[in-house]
Image: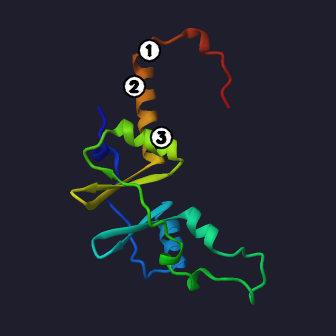
Amino acid sequence: MFSIEAIMSTNLITVPPSATLAEARTLMQDNRIHHIPVLDGDQLIGLISLTNVLAATDSFLRDDGTRIHANDIGIADAMVTEVATVDVNASLRHAALFLEKHKIGCLPVLDDGSLVGIITDTDFVAVAINLLEQIEETEPVDEGFDDLDVA
């Protein structure tokens, strides 16, 4: 079956606490991600999400003179510091249940205390799709569904 190690992302984009929200936002846009671990050296000290970035920056609708710019806000001022993590050898089911129960989008994956990956809700959607495809391959084809108009 699947393991955390099998589905986690290992090509990690990280930032130091000295980075700005503008830098994090650019990394998120360029890499099509929503979560970035914050590292001080090799130590995981926080997590910045797209939600954190959007919540911490002012609306572009405010006038330029009073707007707080993302270049002026440090990651350390907006990151989550109490980061839930998961061990690389933990149960994939338990990780999924934890994400769902706590309504969070990702879990950094640790191996002996070191960051080795990140697992996101998107990774679990991919697993669900894979499982559904496997089920469909084993189900008999029902000829009665040929007339359905699927948009």
Which residue is rendered at x = 41% and y = 29% of the image? 131
Q: Which residue is mark 3?
A: 125
Tell me the CA gap for discs 1 and 3.
21 Å
The answer to whether 87 appears left or right of 33 in the picture is left
**For the residue carrying disc 2, how many other residues have a C-alpha within 10 Å: few (<14), some (14-19), or many (20+)?**
few
| Dot 1: element | loop
Q: Which quarter of the figure is the C terminus placed in?
A: top right
The amino acid on which the numbered mark 3 sits, given as a three-letter code, is Val
Tell me the CA gap for discs 2 and 3.
14 Å
Residue found farthest to the left: 112
Q: Which residue is mark 1?
A: 139
Q: Nearer the viewer, residue 48 or 135?
A: 48
Tell me the CA gap for discs 2 and 1.
9 Å
Relative image position of residue 55 (x, y in whole percent): 63, 68
Relative image position of residue 68 (x, y in whole percent): 66, 83
Does 148 sit above or below residue 120? above
**For the residue carrying disc 3, how many other residues have a C-alpha within 10 Å: few (<14), some (14-19), or many (20+)?**
few
Q: Are marks 1 and 3 in contact (CB under 8 Å)?
A: no
The mark lying in front, picked from 2 and 3, is 3
Q: Are marks 2 and 1 in contact (CB under 8 Å)?
A: no
Relative image position of residue 121 (x, y in whole percent): 47, 47
Relative image position of residue 65 (x, y in whole percent): 75, 90
Q: Which residue is mark 2?
A: 134
Does 62 sit above or below residue 82? below
User: Which tag, 2 or 3, sits closer to the chain's start?
Assistant: 3
User: Which tag, 2 or 1, sits closer to the chain's start?
Assistant: 2
| Dot 3: element | helix
**For the residue carrying disc 1, how many other residues have a C-alpha within 10 Å: few (<14), some (14-19), or many (20+)?**
few
The amino acid on which the numbered mark 1 sits, given as a three-letter code, is Glu
